[in-house]
């Protein structure tokens, strides 16, 4: 598969957040996109906003049968499939002991097994056509044990390992593999985390926009970059810290305190904006 020219993309989690931004930007750059999401109505709205370059489908990534149908639909509606962008994910915030076992299980079913099912569904198709690219939107938490997001981080650890293992297995084929690790991003997921007091480390760094992440993802796709860290200057210390549990235990209290200060500032800013909007709404037009 050449680096230039329009591609046909299947983007999961495309109804909102990073997935929707990837779909919009991909279409702007001349690609054709299948917007896939368990929220079928939301996916359709995004596809309609994009226009003729996009189609939509309902896809529960936990279902192998739905993955097969989604890929078949790409053939039917887009004329084929060149790039699978695994982006969909969920989070259950809270201390591990307070999160229901069913919620931990759901996190792994969606964040790990969902993308795995997708890769395994697309793999024979890509191998048969002699080209194809897997783009995995993972997380910087894949390098860190993360209090308050234990199963989320663990699911991303597992996803990164599978992605790279599959890439090694397919190293003699023409298929390509790219994995991107976003930092905190302003999505509905981050809003959910902001409502909890139990995952302050999610707010250690300033959140970026979904559009910013989409730019990084599509650039990595075009260049076929093996792995991308966000922000790049934090890659080395984060990876080093994640593999040094003794040091991590020494700094975790400081990290959580810093994240909590940022979270408090975020909440104060949101409250201020809400107050200003209330006052504005009360002014007669």
Image (spheres, helix red, strand yellow):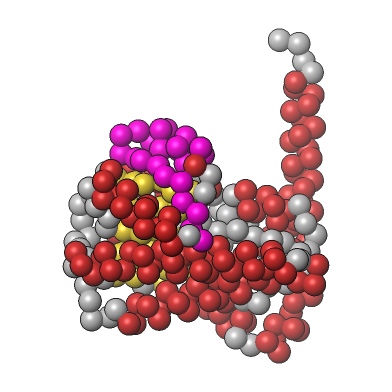
Is residue 217 at all visible to an observer of this figure? Answer: no
Which image quarter is the N terminus in?
A: bottom left
Residue at 42% x, 33% y is: 49
Pick the front one: 272 or 140:
140
| Magenta segment includes 19 | no
**Percent x, y for residue 164?**
41, 78
| Magenta segment includes 46 | yes
**Percent x, y for residue 2?**
19, 61
Residue at 68% x, 72% y is: 150
Pick the front one: 72 or 197:
72
Q: Is residue 201 left or right of residue 211?
A: right
Which image quarter is the C terminus in?
A: top right
Placement of 135 over or under 270, stated as above or below: below
**Percent x, y for residue 217?**
41, 58
Residue at 63% x, 53% y is: 189
Q: Residue furthest top?
A: 285
Q: Residue furthest front?
A: 65
**Percent x, y for residue 227?**
41, 71
Q: Quadrant of residue 278?
A: top right
Placement of 48 over or under 176, stated as above or below: above
Is residue 194 at all visible to an observer of this figure? Answer: yes
Q: Is residue 36 left or right of residue 221?
A: right
Q: How many marks?
A: 0
Q: Quadrant of residue 281?
A: top right
Residue at 76% x, 66% y is: 99
Q: Is residue 81 left or right of residue 110?
A: left
Magenta stretch: give its range.
41-62
């Amino acid at each position: 598969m050449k680096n230039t020219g329009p591609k046909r993309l299947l983007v999961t989690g495309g109804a909102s957040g990073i997935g929707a931004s990837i779909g919009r930007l991909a279409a702007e750059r001349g690609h054709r996109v299948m917007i896939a999401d368990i929220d079928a109505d939301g996916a359709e709205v995004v596809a309609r906003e994009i226009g003729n370059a996009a189609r939509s489908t309902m896809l529960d990534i936990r279902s192998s049968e739905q993955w097969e149908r989604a890929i078949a639909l790409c053939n039917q509606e887009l004329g084929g499939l060149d790039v699978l962008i695994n982006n969909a994910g969920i989070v259950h915030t809270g201390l591990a002991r307070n999160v229901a076992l069913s919620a931990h299980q759901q996190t792994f079913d969606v964040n790990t097994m969902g993308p795995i099912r997708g890769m395994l569904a697309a793999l024979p198709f890509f191998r048969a056509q002699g080209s194809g690219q897997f783009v995995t939107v993972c997380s910087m938490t894949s390098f860190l044990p993360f209090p308050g997001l234990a199963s989320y981080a663990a699911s991303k650890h597992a996803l990164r390992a599978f992605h790279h293992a599959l890439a090694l297995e397919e190293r003699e084929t023409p298929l390509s593999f790219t994995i991107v690790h976003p930092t905190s991003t302003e999505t509905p997921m981050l809003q959910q985390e902001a409502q909890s007091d139990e995952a302050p480390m999610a707010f250690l760094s300033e959140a970026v926009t979904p559009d910013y992440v989409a730019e990084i993802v599509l650039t990595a796709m075009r260049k076929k970059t093996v792995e991308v860290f966000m922000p790049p200057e934090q890659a080395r210390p984060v990876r080093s810290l994640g593999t040094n549990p003794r040091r991590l235990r020494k700094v975790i209290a400081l990290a959580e305190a810093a994240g909590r200060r940022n979270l408090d500032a975020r909440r104060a800013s949101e409250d201020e904006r809400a107050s200003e909007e209330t006052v504005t709404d009360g002014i007669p037009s």
